Image (tube, coloured by chain):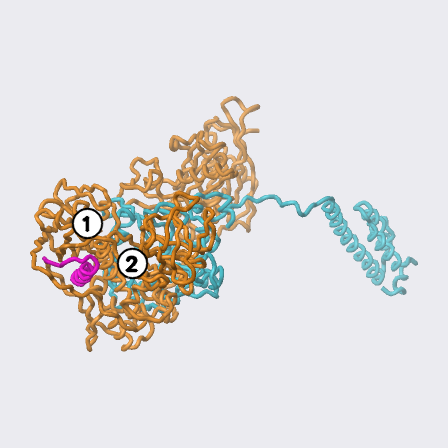
Amino acid sequence: MDSLAAMLSNGTDWNAYQEEALAAIGAALSEQELDDARVKYLGRKSELAQALRGVRDRESGILLNGVRSTLEEAVAEREAELLRLAYELAAEAGVDVTIPGTPVHRGRLHLLTQIRREIEDIFLGLGYEVWDGNEVATVWENFDALTSDPGHPSRSQFDTFYIDENTVLRTHTSPDQIRAMQQRKPPIYMVSPGRCYRRDTPDATHSPIFLQVECLAVDRGITLADLQGTVLKFFRALFGEQREVRMRTSFFPFTEPSVEFDVTCFICGGKGCATCKYSGWIEMGGAGWVDPDVFRNVGIDPDEYQGFAFGFGIERIAMLRHGLPDLRAFWENDLRVLGQF
Amino acid sequence: MKVPVSWLREYVDFDLPVEELARRLVFTSCEVDRIVRQGAPGGANLEHFVVGKVLEAGKHPNADKLQLTKVDVGSGEPRSIVCGAWNFGAGATVAVVLPGGVMPGGEFTIEKRKLRGEVSEGMILSERELELGQDHGGIMVLSDELAPGTPLADVLPLGDDILEIETLYNRPDLTSIYGIAREVAALLETELHPMPGTEPRREGDEPVEIAIDDLVASSRYIGRLFRDVALSESPAWLKARLTGAGMRPISNVVDVTNYVMLALGNPLHAFDYDKLAGSRIVVRRARPGEKLETLDGTMRELAPEDLVIADAEKPIGIAGVMGGGNTEVSDETTNVLLEAANFEPLTVLRSGERHRMRTESQTRWEKGVDPELAGPAATYASQLLVELAGARWTGEGEVRGEIPPPPVIAFRPGYTNDVLGMEVAEEEQRGRLGRLGFGVDDDWTVHTPTWRRRDVRRDIDVVEEVARFQLEHVPATLPVRQEMFGRLKHEQRLRRQVEDVLAGAGMYEAYTYSLQATDPDPNAIELPVPLSSQQRVLRTTLAIGLLAAAQHNIDMGNTDIALFEVAHVYLPPGPVPDERWRLGGIVQGDFFKTKGIVEAVFAALHIEPTFERAKLRNEFVVGATVQSGWVGTYGPLELDGQWSAFELDLAELFAAVPERILYRDVITYPQLRLDLAVVVDEGVPAGDLMTAARAAAGEELREVRFLSDYRGDPIPEGKKSVAIAVAFQSPDRTLTEDDAARLRAAIVQALAERFEAELRA
């Protein structure tokens, strides 16, 4: 507003009026003081209100309405500032930000569930389905169909829990291979986590009940190199991209050739430490190329389809990765232990 | 199996360091647990071990139990040595370790020191101190022909590296040193020496009468008679090898049978021939009531399924497992019958299980011994009996059933490449198979050697024989996918959701045992042979395991306990139970705390729960059923405080989850809310009031919520006031005050009619 225009109406310097009012509004330190200033400069009896009532010409109207809206905005702004100031004052009065917040009660998934899900998710990413298998299996599913030798010691009642002569608590997740292949047509890519049972006396590394994961791939042209690659991808996803794996010869009734696979130690990186018994390698599980006779037992033509399978223990991964010395802790459910993960 | 490396080197030449050999065997053949040094540490240390000649020996002046000796060790002044043994005197030739020598185990270095005031400059050694045997009765007395100062290593096997390997189930041929040597030869592409054993001269033609009742269980039995056997200790080299292989030397005759078993893999047995009734051997099943005291001193009641070795009258051994005390070779023995036979694996396995025995012999038979090995084993043992026990071989008998020929397999080297996903040259395949003892014809017909007959029967088995030498070189690829993709199934996603809701609601997930000591269901499936009385029954509820987990937490001093578990239960009847996924929980707190958690699960799954009062099992004082399960509060427990629990069957629960959630317009028209309080008899469940209100108001009722339940002044005795909040909303118009009044009246009327409810002012 130029000073000439400001002088237009009845001799009041509206420029000065506005400055004065803005100063009063800005100086208000309470709602009361702000209200006083508002009444004085914007109220019905204020000079501005009276002048507005007397406006006859357009230019004066524009000028005075401009002053009014500027002041109204200033009042609203100062009001918000005072409110914020009041909050700050209230808060500043002795808030010790180092005192813990109001507790929220939250629970936890069991470490074994966390790891099981992580494993499932890696395989889901590789395009596998997750299979839920029953824990009670027929002797055929658990042993015979997997071409286990009738004399194999794992069949003995000293190693296996029998319910009757044809029924056992599954000793591995491998019967799920059989069930999956009976129920689905290839290609099959599946992973089956679950409880297994063996007559092992409990100690730090043995439990009569334990969790295993079985992985089965059945498709055209599956090779041992595919097994090696899958195992490698899996353990890199689980333990880090720097990991390497190796296969060693082994024996399982249902794979031929059979291998054990090791992964480079994720504690020392392969240099040797107590965890890997100074070998640089950690034994992870068993695997192999599916024996053609297993395919025949479930009605799949081994000339058309080939496959690989591998299996490993969930507790072992949990123990190695988190440094738990005793697997009995998983079944004791002590909140001080469960709460750590 | 423990493999003394010096023994292995007798059958195969190799230059590789033992560590590198072990590393490579691990890929191709067997696990190598570790390499240990048996006996004295090698290298320059062995120079401290020498032959000594005792010049003087007498009682230590200050100790009754010690001898003070002067020993000529070939160089310098005779050494003064204090010794605790008394089985020698002046003139004896002994083994001495001089100061600076490190003893077996590597921990202890001999030093010159004073013993009870007399200087001792070394030690006179016993067998056990050198790990050459078990004898610790006295020091070792050596042949007088040895000159003092002779290096002891020239006379005795002072030290050896031992490979401790774990044999795979399908490789019984690797339970012998010679078998491992064959494997090493194939691995390193080097020469395997001929199998040891030369038939000694036969000095007679005495008949040995042998009969086999069951040629399936025992397809072959060779019995050889040896006379004028001089029973004694075995020579040091043999004892050192047995000790290195983990067996205890006993006597030359027994040691020879064990040595040949370790060398070739065929278990043997020696009987005292003079104790055989009728001088004959019968292989038969045990007769009812027969007993046998086995060599371990245990009296065994034989079962009719047990295959036994018998003489004309009685059992004298459990076939393939252990011999009997009644025909044991002893100091009086002069005539020995050597057994070299074939026993069928399962028969031996079952006998071993039945009698809870585990012997070196049995573990070999169980895996399947080469049926053609009995001959070579008999030959080698005969040679050693003649050489080491001065025996004369005077007779033999043999019964042999039909032993099927080993497999002949049509093979295709390309199959190996198909399986491995890499190329293995044909010459290399042929070479490996040849060194492993397979015959390979020009047209790739493969002849399995007798010692692999059980394992290598098909072309895929031949593939493994080649493939296992390539495992270090297999590339890493991923399957070429045709179809299939991965995703969680509906119920798997819901299961995760339920777990997450509960963890979010403050509960910890527990894992409890599927096998419990007891179960509320009297028909629950019991294991006929449990591992312990604590794990006996397949559970039909998760509650018992969770209660035990809560108990453990209380014992550990933890507070605010809330545990859940998602796992199987096993519903009878067996033998194959109905396995169902259950969700169970236990909460330190009252009924409503627990019910709130259950409601949160239902809410997450979009299921409206309906609770009804119910009598649960006896230990519960408050109980309710809800769709798919129950919630209850325990009566007094051994645990302090109040505890509640719940259990839901997840298949039933998930069946109620709506397939999809349809949008309901809650935005366009406003809601009308109002509160109502009615007075009813105390026994009327609030839930029934709410259900009735819902039914009365019909479609326009959006929500009924419980507010409070009040007893006491001014409500009359026996009555209670129940307050609820209701909200009305229509999807297609704004409800008016009149609508509200109409709906309210409908609810009030329904409650009055059904429950005699009076509206509170």
Provide the residue designation for mark 1.
Answer: B329
Give the class, few, some or many, for how many residues have Cα within 10 Å of label 2's Cα (few <14, many ≥20).
few
Q: Colour of chain A?
A: cyan
User: Magenta span covers which residues?
Assistant: B369-397
Q: Which chain is orange?
A: B
Question: What numbered label is drawn on residue B143?
Answer: 2
How far across and down, in percent of the image, does residue B428 sit?
29, 76
Q: Quadrant of the N terminus of chain B?
A: bottom left
Which mark sits nearer the N-terminus, 1 or 2? 2
- Answer whether residue B170 is visible to the viewer in this image: no
Magenta stretch contains residue B392? yes
| Same subunit: marks 1 and 2 | yes
SS of the residue under disc 1:
loop
Residue lying farthest to the right in this orientation: A11
Q: Is residue A171 above or below residue B722?
A: below
**Which sits in the foreground, A246 or A230?**
A246
At x 12% / y 56%, what residue is drawn? Answer: B225
Residue B44 is situated, as x and y percent measured from the top left of the image, at 42, 65
